[in-house]
Amino acid sequence: MNDEPGKTDIEEEHFRNLVETLPNLLWICQLDGTCDYSSPQWSEYTGLPESEISGFGWLEHVHPEDRQRASDIWKTASETSTSLVMKFRIRSSDGDYRWFKTRAVLQTDQREQLQKWYASATDIQEMSETQAALQELNQELESRMAAAVAEVKESHADLEDLTWQLKEAQSLANLGSWGLDVETGKVTWSEELFRSFGLDPNTDEPLNLEQQAEVFEAESWKSLNQAITHALETGEGYRLELQFSLPDSSPRWILASGECRLNPNREIVGLHGTAQDITQLKLTQLQLEHNSERMRLATEAARIGIWDFNIESGQLVWDDMMHDLYGTEPETFSGTFQDWASSIHPEDLEPTQSAFQQCLAQEATFESTFRIVKGDGTVKYLGGLAMIHRRQDGSAERAVGVNWDLTEQKQAEFSLRASEHLLRDFVRYAPVAIAMLDSNMRYLQASERWLTEYNLEGQEIIGRCFYQVSPQIPEHWKEIHQRVLAGSTESCDEECLPQRDGANEWLQWEARPWKNAHGRVGGLILYTRFITNRKRMELQLRSQKDDLERSNRDLEQFAYAASHDLQEPLRAVSGCAQILQSRYKDKLDSGADELIQHVVEGASRMQTLILDLLAFSRVGRIGASFTTFRVDKAIDEALLFLDSSIRENQAQVSFEPLTDVTVTGDFALLRQLFQNLVGNAIKYRSSKPPRIQIAVHRDDQEWVFSVQDNGIGIKSEHFTRIFGLFQRLHSRTEHPGTGIGLALCEKIINSHGGRIWVSSEPGHGSIFYFTLPVPNGDHLDDVQKIY
Ligand code: ADP
């Protein structure tokens, strides 16, 4: 190694030269920062000898503000054995500080075998300044940029503002704008236009010309199409009112205007324009037209004539209806006040004229009713109403008015008055006590009978309160009156009114509301009738009826007792007479035989009579036993009783199959009824063999039976009589009988709640009818099977 000592020295030399040529400040320190070596650049920069730098001298030249930080970084790096980079300021020989960037690396010193710092500081003052200037510039730029951005933003906001305002204005005015590019055929619409067409500007496309053709009304589309064609040909704009329909078919109107858009060569490149939605306006206009048409129709229908009188010039204008009302011709009408005056009824001219003059002087409206005389002499009533127009100073300028025909109304009024008069007279002279009162119970009218019956003659009661006029009325009548005024009708057939003298008066009354023209209760009408006499007679009649019934019952009782008690002695008489006849026939003289024969016959007749009487008086006396049974059973049994008579007379009795007809009653009595009727039909036969028919039909809740024969018949004057007791139309020799049979039938039927009658014609037979109630639960459906 020592062979080449010169080489190390040379290398050191080179190194030193190299270090000293570097612009950097270089130094070597121990771990704690003690400087062992500083390059000549240090002395050069600081203007101090190397000795001042070594040790910790270099730290003295670091800017006081950076010193502590530099020393701390150094210390930390020493402790962690890491290299360091830091910036701090170092004082120069002229006392100014400059920025240096220091890098220090830990290396082992070959010679001393110690770890040392090898540090180099590069002057970055200029770079720092440039950097600061750049930073400043940057800041400036940034602030300018920000200002520019703010400005752009502001103007953008202004633009947005303007667009919004435009949209608002368009929306407020319902005004939309549109454009059409001729070359591309593209249509553009403003938002408002979308809305006018019921479309959504955010989702829908503007309608192209084909779609518009669909939407517009035929006429509108035609004129729009012509206008567009004309504009494109001539460059002239247009303005049109167009109608179209919304998707929901409601009509819309727009006022559309179009202008041509020209390029710099003044060639037409498109169309643009506005479209204002005038639907509301149009609808209002249509409504107005409709209203005025309605008004016209109304005045025409109501036959209202309109006139206009210029007070200053004296010019009078009439519409057609006025001429129609007055029967004048527009051609001969001179338009003066005199035209009107000459038509007025002479009696009404002066009052109407002076009323009009008074109105001119003071009031605003003029109302009147007057008569006119038409050319043909007919008189009409007219109603008139007029408004006076005045100048600012209050003087009358113009009068405009209407006339209408009141003739029918007047006539109705007259006839109403006449009928009122008639009604008043009618009430007044009605032969009943009747009074008409208003809702406050004040008398409106009363009949003369009312006045006499209530001792009000000579008193002026009209307008006075009912309760003042008659304070003695029963208290409960007031409640009745209130109910009637509330709308109900009340009546009483007999009300007893005890009198002061203890006697009773009987009154029949009725109170009913009367209604006014509005259909509301206007008051009440009272009708009363004293029925004391009738009531007395009724009471008398009732007592007489009771007496009669009592005596009838006694008589029936007597008849029953008599016929019952007579049977026994009569049987004895009859028996004895028969014995007498059989024992002494032809043993006495012929006169005695005849007398005995008379006794036998008389006793037999008397027995029949007594049996019949007994049967008659039994009906209703002995409690009937009612059951429900098939009626044909009763008929069958009756025919069985009549069997020998039927045979003898070769009679035929037929009846419908009555199996479904049931009745509720006393079987024995109804059997007796059929027996009597069929028996009579055979007994009162003609020369022809008897033909008897029993039938029945239903009439609502009744069975109507009929027993028809082909016998001798009955004259109509006897139809009622034959049902009387002991009433006969024939002598005993012609037809035997007691005259009780039909009376018994009637009594039986009455006791069953039915009726009996006959219809007949002499020589043509008779039909005896009787009714019986249909038992409950017997249905029509069942009965109809019979027919
Ligand atoms: P009577 O048969 O016992 O005389 P009725 O009371 O049964 O009594 O009849 C009263 C009268 O009615 C009879 O006398 C007769 O003249 C008349 N009469 C009753 N039934 C018939 C009949 N079917 N045809 C004609 N006359 C009749």
Image (spheres, rainbow, N blue to C red):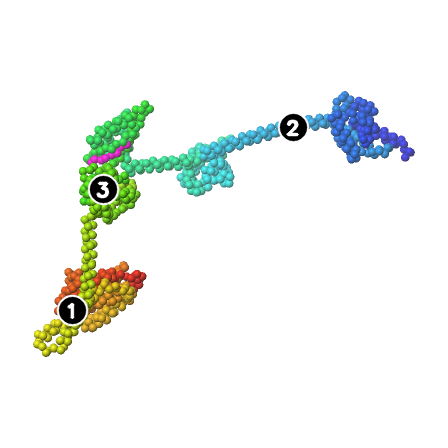
Tell me which residue sits at (29%, 38%) in the image.
301
Q: Which of the two marks, 1 or 2, is nearer to us in this view?
A: 1
Q: Earlier in the sequence, mark 3 or mark 2?
A: 2
Disc 1 crowd rating (10 Å Cα; few below 14, some 14-19, many 20+) is some
Q: Earlier in the sequence, mark 1 or mark 3?
A: 3
Q: Nearer the viewer, residue 44 or 54?
A: 54
Q: Earlier in the sequence, mark 1 or mark 2?
A: 2
**Residue 701 seen by the camera:** yes
Q: Residue type at mark 2: give it.
A: Gln
Q: Which residue bears the numbered disc 1?
A: 606
> Is residue 380 rendered magenta in the image?
yes
Q: Which of the two marks, 1 or 3, is nearer to us in this view?
A: 1
Q: Residue type at mark 3: give it.
A: Ala
Tell me which residue sits at (25%, 27%) in the image.
357
Q: CA distance from mark 3 to mark 2?
A: 115 Å
Q: Is residue 48 above or below residue 289?
A: above
Span of residues in magenta: 378-385
Q: Which residue bears the numbered disc 2?
A: 139
